[in-house]
Amino acid sequence: MAVNLQGLTDNARKTAIAELNARLADAVALSAAIKQAHWNVKGRNFIAVHELFDQVFANLQVHVDEMAERVQQLDGVAVGTVEKVAKASSIKEYPTDLTKAEDHIKALSERMRDYGAKVRESIDSTDEAGDADTADLFTAASRTADKDLWFMESHLE
């Protein structure tokens, strides 16, 4: 088993790159869904929901950038073009006919929950492969997704 400069086995590095690119595709697709909702939301609490979507988007972008940069650190290629993301993302396609705030919150919450579950799977996969640093990156992304999901779902009470 070859060990690279980071002290990782080739398998750990390849596993991490694959997991990072998979979650990167999901995060970019989720980002686009959040912006779709942000641009088209209407309703009683418009400004609060509109601004919430902006904050959730900004929080996600931090992790998008960290995932892409970690791929580079591991000597991989971060894949984030719209065309590649559309093919690679496992996030359910976002409907473009929603306008009501509650409908957007429900649709985004469903996708955020799915994204969070997949990020947690990536934590386990990268940790088991021997890349604790990438597992830690995913742990931070998971905590952010959980908090943002809580914020969104709190609007449904």
Image (cartoon, rainbow, N blue to C red):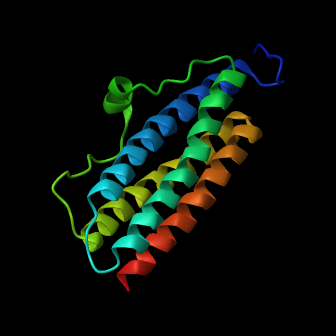
Q: Nearer the viewer, residue 76 or 99?
A: 99
Q: Quadrant of the C terminus?
A: bottom left
> From this viewpoint, which residue is outermost toward the top?
2
Whether 119 is drawn above or below 65: the answer is: below
Q: Residue at x 50, y 73 (%)?
A: 150
In the rendered image, residue 5, in percent from the top left (x then y), is placed at 83, 17
Q: Residue at x 48, y 53 (%)?
A: 57
Q: Quadrant of residue 8?
A: top right
Whether 42 is drawn above or below 45: the answer is: above
Q: Quadrant of the N terminus?
A: top right
In the rendered image, residue 31, in percent from the top left (x then y), is placed at 43, 46
> From this viewpoint, which residue is outermost toward the left?
97
Q: Residue at x 32, y 28 (%)?
A: 87
Whether 30 is drawn above or below 80: the answer is: below
Q: Nearer the viewer, residue 37 or 73?
A: 37
How many marks are shown on the rendered structure?
0
Q: Quadrant of residue 142?
A: bottom right
Q: Quadrant of residue 45?
A: bottom left
Q: Nearer the viewer, residue 96 or 77?
A: 96
In the rendered image, residue 6, in percent from the top left (x then y), is placed at 82, 24
**Horizontally, is 133 left or right of 95 in the view?**
right
Q: Residue at x 40, y 47 (%)?
A: 30
Whether 42 is drawn above or below 81: the answer is: below
> From this viewpoint, which residue is outermost toward the bottom?
157
Q: Nearer the viewer, residue 16 or 2?
A: 16
**Horizontally, is 102 left or right of 23 in the view?**
left
